[in-house]
Image (cartoon, grey):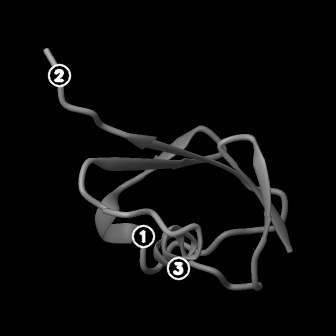
Amino acid sequence: MEVLVNNKLYAVQPDTSVTALLQFIQLSSLKGIAVAINQEVVPKPDWPSKLLSPSDNVTIIQATQGG
């Protein structure tokens, strides 16, 4: 199935969780990351159990340091 992640199309297996997606796209660190699916924020404790659906629009935001 295909999902859109930050405007880039990815083919993932059915029943892919948010955690598995983050591993699949090889994010270097899961610290400071927020995930929204179809413009609804998914709390971090729910990532392992939240499964993606075909055509989901996933937004990943990573906090940066600065001042």
Q: Which circle, 1 or 2, is nearer the viewer? A: 2
User: What's the amino acid at mark 1?
Assistant: Trp
Q: Nearer the viewer, mark 1 or mark 3?
A: 3
Mark 3 neighbour density, 10 Å: few (under 14) some (14–19) many (20 or more): some
Q: Earlier in the sequence, mark 2 or mark 3?
A: 3
Q: Report the mark closest to the observer, 2 or 3.
A: 2
Mark 2 to mark 3 CA distance (whole Å): 29 Å
Q: Is residue 32 left or right of residue 33?
A: left
Q: Secondary structure at mark 2?
A: loop
Earlier residue among tags 1 and 2: 1
Percent coordinates x, y for residue 2 in the rendering: 84, 66
Give yes or no for contact between labels 2 and 3 (Cβ–Cβ under 8 Å): no
Considering every residue shown, the one lying at the far left of the view is 67
Residue at 50 percent of width and 68 percent of height? 22
Disc 1 and disc 3: Cα gap in Å? 9 Å
Element marked by disc 3:
helix
Type of amino acid at the residue the image marks with label 3: Ala
Identify the residue position indicated by label 2 in the image.
66
Q: Classify mark 1: residues with Cα within 10 Å, few (<14), some (14-19) or many (20+).
A: some
Q: Is the N terminus in the top left, top right, bottom left or bottom right quadrant?
A: bottom right
Where residue 66 appears, as percent x and y from the top left, is 17, 22
Residue behind mark 1? 47
